[in-house]
Image (tube, helix red, strand yellow):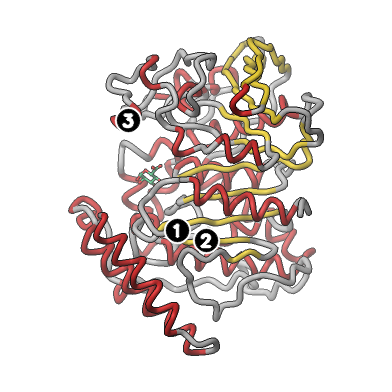
Amino acid sequence: MKNLLIYIVIAFVVSGCNCQKSDVESQCDKRLTYKVYDSSVEEASDWVKKYSNLDEAKANIYKRLDILKTSSGEAIETPLQWEHEKKQVKEFFANSVYGKPLARPQKLEFKLLESGEVKDLNAIRKQFKIVATNNEKVYEFNVLVYIPKNVKNLPVFVSPNFTGNHTVWFDKKIILPNTYLRINKRVGIEDNSPSEQQRGKASWRHPIDKILSRGYAFATFCYCEVFPDHFKGAKDSVYQIYPPRAKATAIPAWAWGNSRVLDLLETLPEIDAQKAIVIGHSRLGKTAIYTGVFDTRFAITISNDSGCLGAATNRRNFGESISHMAKSKGLNYWFVDELKNFGGYEVEKIPFDQSHFLACVAPRGLYVASATADLWADPLGEYQSFKDAGKIYALYGAKNVPSQADKLYIQKQFLGDIAHHLRIGKHDIVEYDWLNFMDYADKIFKRK
Ligand code: GCU
Protein backbone atom coordinates (compact mmCIF):
# COMPACT_ATOMS: atom_id res chain seq x y z
CA MET A 1 0.00 0.00 0.00
CA LYS A 2 2.80 2.34 0.97
CA ASN A 3 4.50 1.69 -2.38
CA LEU A 4 1.26 2.34 -4.20
CA LEU A 5 0.87 5.69 -2.51
CA ILE A 6 4.43 6.71 -3.27
CA TYR A 7 3.89 5.69 -6.88
CA ILE A 8 0.67 7.68 -7.12
CA VAL A 9 2.23 10.77 -5.60
CA ILE A 10 5.25 10.55 -7.93
CA ALA A 11 2.97 9.97 -10.93
CA PHE A 12 0.88 12.95 -9.86
CA VAL A 13 3.83 15.29 -9.47
CA VAL A 14 5.51 14.15 -12.70
CA SER A 15 2.34 14.34 -14.77
CA GLY A 16 1.38 17.64 -13.16
CA CYS A 17 4.75 19.18 -14.06
CA ASN A 18 4.57 18.05 -17.68
CA CYS A 19 1.07 19.36 -18.16
CA GLN A 20 0.31 22.42 -20.19
CA LYS A 21 -3.17 23.92 -19.97
CA SER A 22 -5.90 23.16 -22.57
CA ASP A 23 -6.44 19.76 -24.17
CA VAL A 24 -3.04 18.44 -23.11
CA GLU A 25 -4.23 18.94 -19.57
CA SER A 26 -7.27 16.78 -20.02
CA GLN A 27 -5.25 13.96 -21.57
CA CYS A 28 -2.81 14.25 -18.74
CA ASP A 29 -5.57 13.88 -16.19
CA LYS A 30 -7.03 10.99 -18.07
CA ARG A 31 -3.71 9.17 -18.21
CA LEU A 32 -3.17 9.81 -14.54
CA THR A 33 -6.65 8.61 -13.66
CA TYR A 34 -6.21 5.34 -15.44
CA LYS A 35 -2.77 4.81 -13.95
CA VAL A 36 -4.28 5.08 -10.53
CA TYR A 37 -7.13 2.83 -11.50
CA ASP A 38 -4.86 0.21 -12.95
CA SER A 39 -2.82 0.04 -9.76
CA SER A 40 -5.97 -0.10 -7.64
CA VAL A 41 -7.45 -2.84 -9.79
CA GLU A 42 -4.30 -4.89 -9.26
CA GLU A 43 -4.59 -4.32 -5.53
CA ALA A 44 -8.33 -4.98 -5.25
CA SER A 45 -9.23 -7.89 -3.02
CA ASP A 46 -10.24 -11.23 -4.54
CA TRP A 47 -13.67 -10.70 -3.01
CA VAL A 48 -14.19 -7.40 -4.86
CA LYS A 49 -12.88 -8.94 -8.10
CA LYS A 50 -15.23 -11.90 -7.69
CA TYR A 51 -18.38 -9.84 -7.14
CA SER A 52 -17.81 -6.96 -9.52
CA ASN A 53 -16.51 -5.93 -12.88
CA LEU A 54 -13.41 -3.73 -12.62
CA ASP A 55 -12.67 -3.58 -16.31
CA GLU A 56 -13.40 -0.12 -17.74
CA ALA A 57 -13.81 -1.67 -21.19
CA LYS A 58 -16.84 -3.60 -19.93
CA ALA A 59 -18.32 -0.83 -17.80
CA ASN A 60 -20.51 1.13 -20.18
CA ILE A 61 -22.94 -1.55 -21.27
CA TYR A 62 -26.20 0.08 -20.17
CA LYS A 63 -28.19 2.78 -21.89
CA ARG A 64 -27.62 6.11 -20.14
CA LEU A 65 -30.43 8.46 -19.20
CA ASP A 66 -30.60 12.12 -20.09
CA ILE A 67 -31.41 13.99 -16.89
CA LEU A 68 -32.82 16.87 -18.92
CA LYS A 69 -35.60 14.65 -20.25
CA THR A 70 -38.60 13.45 -18.24
CA SER A 71 -39.25 9.72 -17.95
CA SER A 72 -41.81 10.20 -20.73
CA GLY A 73 -39.22 11.89 -22.97
CA GLU A 74 -40.13 15.59 -22.72
CA ALA A 75 -37.44 18.24 -22.36
CA ILE A 76 -36.78 19.70 -18.90
CA GLU A 77 -35.78 23.31 -19.40
CA THR A 78 -37.03 25.14 -16.32
CA PRO A 79 -36.91 24.64 -12.55
CA LEU A 80 -40.69 24.27 -12.60
CA GLN A 81 -40.51 21.37 -15.04
CA TRP A 82 -37.84 19.75 -12.87
CA GLU A 83 -39.91 20.30 -9.71
CA HIS A 84 -42.68 18.36 -11.38
CA GLU A 85 -40.33 15.51 -12.36
CA LYS A 86 -38.73 15.63 -8.90
CA LYS A 87 -42.00 14.55 -7.28
CA GLN A 88 -41.91 11.37 -9.32
CA VAL A 89 -38.23 10.80 -8.68
CA LYS A 90 -38.77 11.05 -4.91
CA GLU A 91 -41.80 8.81 -5.06
CA PHE A 92 -39.93 6.21 -7.09
CA PHE A 93 -36.93 6.07 -4.77
CA ALA A 94 -39.16 5.97 -1.67
CA ASN A 95 -41.41 3.20 -3.02
CA SER A 96 -39.03 1.08 -5.05
CA VAL A 97 -35.55 1.54 -3.58
CA TYR A 98 -35.10 2.76 0.00
CA GLY A 99 -38.54 2.83 1.65
CA LYS A 100 -40.66 5.85 2.56
CA PRO A 101 -39.44 8.51 4.99
CA LEU A 102 -40.63 8.18 8.59
CA ALA A 103 -42.71 11.12 9.81
CA ARG A 104 -41.71 13.36 12.68
CA PRO A 105 -43.02 11.69 15.85
CA GLN A 106 -46.03 13.21 17.63
CA LYS A 107 -43.90 14.27 20.59
CA LEU A 108 -40.19 14.99 20.98
CA GLU A 109 -38.26 15.75 24.17
CA PHE A 110 -34.60 16.67 24.41
CA LYS A 111 -33.22 15.70 27.82
CA LEU A 112 -29.84 17.17 28.67
CA LEU A 113 -27.89 14.28 30.20
CA GLU A 114 -24.59 16.02 30.72
CA SER A 115 -22.68 19.10 29.74
CA GLY A 116 -19.16 20.39 30.36
CA GLU A 117 -16.24 22.37 29.09
CA VAL A 118 -13.60 20.62 27.01
CA LYS A 119 -10.50 22.77 27.50
CA ASP A 120 -8.27 21.27 24.81
CA LEU A 121 -11.04 21.74 22.23
CA ASN A 122 -12.00 25.20 23.49
CA ALA A 123 -15.56 23.94 23.32
CA ILE A 124 -18.64 22.92 25.28
CA ARG A 125 -19.81 19.32 25.18
CA LYS A 126 -23.52 18.62 25.54
CA GLN A 127 -25.08 15.17 25.61
CA PHE A 128 -28.80 14.68 25.12
CA LYS A 129 -31.29 11.89 25.10
CA ILE A 130 -33.84 12.37 22.34
CA VAL A 131 -37.14 10.89 23.50
CA ALA A 132 -39.57 10.33 20.63
CA THR A 133 -43.17 9.42 21.36
CA ASN A 134 -45.55 8.19 18.69
CA ASN A 135 -48.81 6.27 19.07
CA GLU A 136 -48.08 6.22 22.83
CA LYS A 137 -44.88 4.30 22.24
CA VAL A 138 -41.47 5.67 23.14
CA TYR A 139 -38.07 5.38 21.43
CA GLU A 140 -34.87 6.96 22.74
CA PHE A 141 -31.33 7.55 21.51
CA ASN A 142 -28.34 9.65 22.60
CA VAL A 143 -26.74 12.57 20.82
CA LEU A 144 -23.36 14.16 21.44
CA VAL A 145 -22.84 17.80 20.46
CA TYR A 146 -19.60 19.82 20.55
CA ILE A 147 -20.00 23.58 20.36
CA PRO A 148 -17.02 25.96 19.94
CA LYS A 149 -16.93 28.41 22.86
CA ASN A 150 -18.07 32.02 22.66
CA VAL A 151 -19.20 31.88 19.05
CA LYS A 152 -22.75 32.47 17.89
CA ASN A 153 -24.80 31.47 14.82
CA LEU A 154 -22.75 28.36 14.31
CA PRO A 155 -23.11 26.18 11.25
CA VAL A 156 -23.29 22.53 12.26
CA PHE A 157 -22.41 19.09 10.93
CA VAL A 158 -24.89 16.30 11.57
CA SER A 159 -22.61 13.30 11.27
CA PRO A 160 -23.87 9.91 12.43
CA ASN A 161 -21.16 7.49 13.55
CA PHE A 162 -20.69 3.74 13.04
CA THR A 163 -19.01 2.73 16.27
CA GLY A 164 -20.58 4.66 19.16
CA ASN A 165 -20.30 8.27 20.36
CA HIS A 166 -17.49 7.28 22.74
CA THR A 167 -15.27 6.31 19.79
CA VAL A 168 -15.42 9.67 17.97
CA TRP A 169 -13.07 11.51 20.35
CA PHE A 170 -10.73 10.93 23.32
CA ASP A 171 -13.10 12.46 25.84
CA LYS A 172 -13.63 10.48 29.05
CA LYS A 173 -16.99 12.13 29.67
CA ILE A 174 -18.69 10.76 26.55
CA ILE A 175 -21.44 8.38 27.62
CA LEU A 176 -21.03 4.79 26.40
CA PRO A 177 -23.95 3.61 24.25
CA ASN A 178 -26.22 0.83 25.32
CA THR A 179 -26.57 -0.78 21.92
CA TYR A 180 -25.43 -3.46 19.52
CA LEU A 181 -22.27 -2.36 17.66
CA ARG A 182 -20.88 -3.95 14.53
CA ILE A 183 -17.56 -5.76 14.92
CA ASN A 184 -14.71 -3.39 14.07
CA LYS A 185 -11.24 -4.63 14.91
CA ARG A 186 -9.55 -1.27 14.28
CA VAL A 187 -11.80 0.36 16.88
CA GLY A 188 -11.55 -2.63 19.21
CA ILE A 189 -15.17 -3.78 18.91
CA GLU A 190 -14.70 -7.55 19.18
CA ASP A 191 -18.06 -8.76 20.45
CA ASN A 192 -20.71 -6.25 19.34
CA SER A 193 -20.53 -4.33 22.60
CA PRO A 194 -19.13 -0.98 23.70
CA SER A 195 -16.16 -0.67 26.09
CA GLU A 196 -13.85 1.92 27.67
CA GLN A 197 -10.91 0.74 25.55
CA GLN A 198 -12.67 1.94 22.40
CA ARG A 199 -12.68 5.61 23.46
CA GLY A 200 -11.45 7.88 20.66
CA LYS A 201 -10.44 4.91 18.50
CA ALA A 202 -12.48 6.14 15.51
CA SER A 203 -11.29 9.73 15.79
CA TRP A 204 -9.45 9.52 12.44
CA ARG A 205 -12.93 9.66 10.90
CA HIS A 206 -14.00 12.84 12.74
CA PRO A 207 -11.20 15.41 13.17
CA ILE A 208 -13.29 17.24 15.77
CA ASP A 209 -10.44 19.56 16.81
CA LYS A 210 -10.11 20.84 13.22
CA ILE A 211 -13.88 21.08 12.75
CA LEU A 212 -14.40 23.13 15.91
CA SER A 213 -11.42 25.38 15.30
CA ARG A 214 -12.89 26.29 11.91
CA GLY A 215 -16.04 27.49 13.71
CA TYR A 216 -18.36 24.55 13.05
CA ALA A 217 -20.38 22.72 15.68
CA PHE A 218 -20.45 18.93 15.48
CA ALA A 219 -23.39 16.66 16.34
CA THR A 220 -23.24 12.88 16.24
CA PHE A 221 -25.21 9.77 17.20
CA CYS A 222 -24.56 6.09 16.72
CA TYR A 223 -26.66 4.83 13.80
CA CYS A 224 -27.11 1.45 15.52
CA GLU A 225 -29.00 3.24 18.32
CA VAL A 226 -31.69 4.06 15.75
CA PHE A 227 -31.60 0.88 13.66
CA PRO A 228 -29.08 -1.83 14.62
CA ASP A 229 -27.19 -2.57 11.43
CA HIS A 230 -27.94 -6.26 10.88
CA PHE A 231 -30.65 -8.16 9.06
CA LYS A 232 -32.82 -8.56 12.15
CA GLY A 233 -32.24 -4.96 13.29
CA ALA A 234 -35.74 -3.68 12.48
CA LYS A 235 -37.32 -5.21 15.57
CA ASP A 236 -35.11 -3.16 17.89
CA SER A 237 -35.30 -0.02 15.77
CA VAL A 238 -37.31 3.20 15.74
CA TYR A 239 -39.92 1.38 13.63
CA GLN A 240 -41.33 0.13 16.95
CA ILE A 241 -43.17 3.43 17.39
CA TYR A 242 -44.59 3.57 13.86
CA PRO A 243 -47.42 1.61 12.24
CA PRO A 244 -46.08 -1.58 10.62
CA ARG A 245 -45.07 -1.42 6.94
CA ALA A 246 -44.32 -4.13 4.38
CA LYS A 247 -40.58 -3.87 5.07
CA ALA A 248 -38.94 -1.75 7.76
CA THR A 249 -35.76 -0.73 5.94
CA ALA A 250 -32.67 0.77 7.54
CA ILE A 251 -31.92 3.85 5.42
CA PRO A 252 -35.15 5.76 6.24
CA ALA A 253 -34.56 4.94 9.92
CA TRP A 254 -31.00 6.28 9.93
CA ALA A 255 -32.24 9.36 8.04
CA TRP A 256 -34.94 9.75 10.71
CA GLY A 257 -32.08 9.96 13.23
CA ASN A 258 -30.42 12.77 11.23
CA SER A 259 -33.69 14.72 11.13
CA ARG A 260 -34.36 14.31 14.86
CA VAL A 261 -30.86 15.60 15.61
CA LEU A 262 -31.69 18.66 13.53
CA ASP A 263 -34.93 19.07 15.55
CA LEU A 264 -32.74 19.14 18.66
CA LEU A 265 -30.21 21.55 17.14
CA GLU A 266 -33.03 23.95 16.27
CA THR A 267 -33.55 24.43 20.00
CA LEU A 268 -29.91 25.30 20.81
CA PRO A 269 -29.23 29.06 20.95
CA GLU A 270 -25.59 28.76 19.78
CA ILE A 271 -26.55 27.01 16.53
CA ASP A 272 -27.83 28.48 13.29
CA ALA A 273 -30.01 25.58 12.15
CA GLN A 274 -30.37 27.22 8.73
CA LYS A 275 -26.74 26.21 8.28
CA ALA A 276 -27.02 22.49 8.95
CA ILE A 277 -24.95 20.04 6.94
CA VAL A 278 -25.81 16.36 6.74
CA ILE A 279 -22.79 14.18 6.08
CA GLY A 280 -22.19 10.44 5.89
CA HIS A 281 -19.66 7.88 4.74
CA SER A 282 -20.52 4.77 2.71
CA ARG A 283 -23.93 3.36 3.81
CA LEU A 284 -24.28 6.54 5.83
CA GLY A 285 -23.40 8.45 2.65
CA LYS A 286 -26.39 6.80 0.97
CA THR A 287 -28.33 7.86 4.07
CA ALA A 288 -27.02 11.43 3.87
CA ILE A 289 -28.33 11.76 0.30
CA TYR A 290 -31.69 10.29 1.31
CA THR A 291 -31.82 12.72 4.26
CA GLY A 292 -30.94 15.73 2.12
CA VAL A 293 -33.57 14.81 -0.45
CA PHE A 294 -36.43 14.32 2.00
CA ASP A 295 -35.55 16.81 4.75
CA THR A 296 -35.15 20.11 2.97
CA ARG A 297 -34.04 21.92 6.13
CA PHE A 298 -30.48 20.70 5.51
CA ALA A 299 -28.57 23.41 3.66
CA ILE A 300 -25.80 21.08 2.47
CA THR A 301 -25.70 17.34 1.77
CA ILE A 302 -22.36 15.53 1.73
CA SER A 303 -21.93 12.04 0.33
CA ASN A 304 -18.59 10.41 1.05
CA ASP A 305 -17.81 7.15 -0.82
CA SER A 306 -21.52 6.29 -0.96
CA GLY A 307 -21.19 4.14 -4.10
CA CYS A 308 -23.94 1.89 -5.40
CA LEU A 309 -27.40 3.31 -4.66
CA GLY A 310 -25.58 6.30 -3.26
CA ALA A 311 -23.93 8.76 -5.63
CA ALA A 312 -22.75 6.24 -8.26
CA THR A 313 -24.72 6.07 -11.49
CA ASN A 314 -26.73 2.87 -11.81
CA ARG A 315 -25.92 2.85 -15.56
CA ARG A 316 -22.35 1.56 -15.24
CA ASN A 317 -21.31 -2.02 -14.84
CA PHE A 318 -18.40 -1.27 -12.50
CA GLY A 319 -17.90 -2.09 -8.83
CA GLU A 320 -20.87 -3.04 -6.66
CA SER A 321 -24.06 -3.91 -8.52
CA ILE A 322 -27.71 -3.55 -7.59
CA SER A 323 -28.21 -7.29 -7.98
CA HIS A 324 -25.43 -7.96 -5.45
CA MET A 325 -27.05 -5.57 -3.03
CA ALA A 326 -30.54 -6.89 -3.51
CA LYS A 327 -29.41 -10.49 -2.97
CA SER A 328 -26.99 -10.05 -0.10
CA LYS A 329 -28.51 -10.80 3.30
CA GLY A 330 -25.91 -8.51 4.85
CA LEU A 331 -27.15 -5.50 2.88
CA ASN A 332 -30.65 -5.99 1.53
CA TYR A 333 -32.44 -4.92 4.73
CA TRP A 334 -31.40 -1.35 3.81
CA PHE A 335 -33.72 -1.49 0.80
CA VAL A 336 -37.25 -2.53 -0.13
CA ASP A 337 -37.80 -5.87 -1.88
CA GLU A 338 -38.79 -4.19 -5.18
CA LEU A 339 -35.07 -3.66 -5.70
CA LYS A 340 -34.81 -7.33 -6.72
CA ASN A 341 -36.60 -6.42 -9.96
CA PHE A 342 -33.64 -4.35 -11.12
CA GLY A 343 -30.62 -6.67 -11.21
CA GLY A 344 -28.37 -7.05 -14.28
CA TYR A 345 -29.68 -5.51 -17.52
CA GLU A 346 -32.98 -4.90 -15.73
CA VAL A 347 -31.25 -1.85 -14.31
CA GLU A 348 -32.38 -0.22 -17.56
CA LYS A 349 -35.95 -0.58 -16.33
CA ILE A 350 -35.22 1.84 -13.49
CA PRO A 351 -36.80 5.03 -14.77
CA PHE A 352 -34.28 7.24 -12.95
CA ASP A 353 -30.58 7.27 -12.21
CA GLN A 354 -28.80 8.14 -8.95
CA SER A 355 -28.02 11.51 -10.55
CA HIS A 356 -31.76 12.21 -10.46
CA PHE A 357 -31.81 11.41 -6.77
CA LEU A 358 -28.80 13.69 -6.14
CA ALA A 359 -30.46 16.43 -8.17
CA CYS A 360 -33.47 16.35 -5.81
CA VAL A 361 -31.19 18.18 -3.37
CA ALA A 362 -30.97 21.18 -5.76
CA PRO A 363 -30.71 24.10 -5.38
CA ARG A 364 -29.28 23.44 -1.90
CA GLY A 365 -25.61 22.56 -1.44
CA LEU A 366 -24.26 19.21 -2.61
CA TYR A 367 -20.85 17.56 -2.25
CA VAL A 368 -19.80 14.20 -3.67
CA ALA A 369 -16.46 12.75 -2.52
CA SER A 370 -14.73 9.58 -3.68
CA ALA A 371 -11.42 7.77 -3.16
CA THR A 372 -9.13 6.37 -5.86
CA ALA A 373 -8.84 2.85 -4.47
CA ASP A 374 -12.53 2.59 -3.62
CA LEU A 375 -13.40 0.81 -6.84
CA TRP A 376 -16.32 -1.03 -5.20
CA ALA A 377 -18.02 2.40 -4.97
CA ASP A 378 -17.09 3.30 -8.59
CA PRO A 379 -15.51 6.77 -8.27
CA LEU A 380 -15.94 7.43 -12.01
CA GLY A 381 -19.62 6.52 -11.73
CA GLU A 382 -19.99 8.86 -8.76
CA TYR A 383 -18.38 11.63 -10.77
CA GLN A 384 -20.69 10.95 -13.71
CA SER A 385 -23.78 11.36 -11.48
CA PHE A 386 -22.31 14.50 -9.97
CA LYS A 387 -21.83 16.03 -13.42
CA ASP A 388 -25.35 15.05 -14.49
CA ALA A 389 -26.89 16.47 -11.31
CA GLY A 390 -25.01 19.70 -12.09
CA LYS A 391 -27.26 20.17 -15.14
CA ILE A 392 -30.26 20.54 -12.82
CA TYR A 393 -28.36 23.03 -10.65
CA ALA A 394 -27.70 25.04 -13.82
CA LEU A 395 -31.48 25.23 -14.40
CA TYR A 396 -31.75 26.99 -11.04
CA GLY A 397 -29.13 29.49 -12.17
CA ALA A 398 -25.95 27.90 -10.76
CA LYS A 399 -23.07 29.20 -12.83
CA ASN A 400 -20.21 27.15 -11.50
CA VAL A 401 -21.12 23.53 -12.21
CA PRO A 402 -18.96 20.90 -13.90
CA SER A 403 -19.27 20.46 -17.64
CA GLN A 404 -19.52 17.07 -19.29
CA ALA A 405 -16.05 17.64 -20.73
CA ASP A 406 -14.49 18.05 -17.28
CA LYS A 407 -12.01 15.33 -16.48
CA LEU A 408 -11.71 13.63 -13.17
CA TYR A 409 -8.90 15.24 -11.16
CA ILE A 410 -7.09 13.62 -8.29
CA GLN A 411 -6.67 15.40 -4.97
CA LYS A 412 -7.90 18.59 -6.63
CA GLN A 413 -11.27 19.84 -5.50
CA PHE A 414 -13.99 21.03 -7.85
CA LEU A 415 -15.26 23.92 -5.74
CA GLY A 416 -18.27 25.36 -7.49
CA ASP A 417 -21.93 25.79 -6.58
CA ILE A 418 -21.67 22.05 -5.99
CA ALA A 419 -18.40 20.36 -5.10
CA HIS A 420 -16.43 17.17 -5.63
CA HIS A 421 -13.08 15.63 -4.87
CA LEU A 422 -11.31 12.35 -5.47
CA ARG A 423 -8.92 11.59 -2.64
CA ILE A 424 -5.95 9.29 -3.09
CA GLY A 425 -6.56 6.28 -0.93
CA LYS A 426 -9.01 3.72 0.29
CA HIS A 427 -12.69 3.57 1.20
CA ASP A 428 -12.75 5.82 4.26
CA ILE A 429 -13.43 9.33 5.51
CA VAL A 430 -10.39 11.20 6.80
CA GLU A 431 -9.16 14.67 7.66
CA TYR A 432 -8.39 15.51 4.02
CA ASP A 433 -12.07 14.98 3.18
CA TRP A 434 -13.30 17.12 6.07
CA LEU A 435 -10.97 20.03 5.23
CA ASN A 436 -12.36 20.06 1.70
CA PHE A 437 -15.95 19.82 2.96
CA MET A 438 -15.37 22.83 5.21
CA ASP A 439 -13.92 24.85 2.31
CA TYR A 440 -17.15 24.22 0.44
CA ALA A 441 -19.36 24.97 3.45
CA ASP A 442 -17.40 28.23 4.02
CA LYS A 443 -18.14 29.16 0.42
CA ILE A 444 -21.85 28.31 0.59
CA PHE A 445 -22.30 30.07 3.94
CA LYS A 446 -20.14 33.00 2.76
CA ARG A 447 -17.79 32.67 5.70
CA LYS A 448 -14.71 33.94 3.87
C1 GCU B 1 -20.54 -2.62 1.76
C2 GCU B 1 -21.64 -2.31 0.78
C3 GCU B 1 -21.58 -0.86 0.30
C4 GCU B 1 -21.52 0.08 1.48
C5 GCU B 1 -20.37 -0.32 2.36
C6 GCU B 1 -20.27 0.47 3.66
O1 GCU B 1 -19.32 -2.62 1.10
O2 GCU B 1 -21.54 -3.22 -0.29
O3 GCU B 1 -22.70 -0.56 -0.50
O4 GCU B 1 -21.44 1.41 1.04
O5 GCU B 1 -20.54 -1.66 2.77
O6 GCU B 1 -21.23 1.02 4.15
O7 GCU B 1 -19.18 0.44 4.24
Q: Residue at x 53, y 29 (%)?
A: 245
Relative height, residue 239 to residue 389 (above, below): above
Question: Which residue does the numbered mark 2 point to in the structure image?
Answer: 421
State the image coordinates of residue 365 (x, y, percent, origin top left).
69, 54
Figure check: 131 above or below 152: above
Asked if residue 165 is positioned above or below residue 64 in the image, the reply reads above
Q: Are marks 3 and 1 in contact (CB under 8 Å)?
A: no
User: Of circles 3 and 1, which is in front?
Assistant: 1
Give ligand 1's quarter of the image.
top left
Quadrant where the image shows the C terminus: bottom right
Mark 1, residue position: 423
Residue at the image point whose x is 34% and y is 70% from the top: 10
User: Dot 1 surroundings within 10 Å: few (below 14), some, or many (20 or more)?
Assistant: many
In whole angstroms, how far apart are the C-alphas of marks 2 and 1? 6 Å
> Mark 2 near mark 1, Cβ–Cβ under 8 Å?
yes
Mark 3–mark 1 distance (CA, rounded to whole Å): 23 Å
Looking at the rendered structure, the kind of residue marked 2 is His
Give the quadrant of the N terminus: bottom left
Residue hosting label 3: 184
Residue 208, located in which quarter of the rendered image?
Answer: top right
Q: What secondary structure is found at the residue carrying circle 3?
A: loop
First of labels 3, 2 by sequence position: 3
Is the residue indicated by label 3 positioned so its CB lies within 8 Å of ligand 1?
A: no
Inter-mark Cα distance, 3 to 2? 27 Å
Q: Position of residue 137 (x, y in %)?
A: 62, 11
Looking at the image, which is closer to me, 68 or 391?
Answer: 391
Under circle 1, the secondary element is: strand
Query: Could you say whether the residue bearing mark 2 is in a helix, strand or loop?
Result: strand
Residue 168 appears at what percent x and percent y?
Answer: 49, 29
Q: Residue at x 37, y 79 (%)?
A: 31
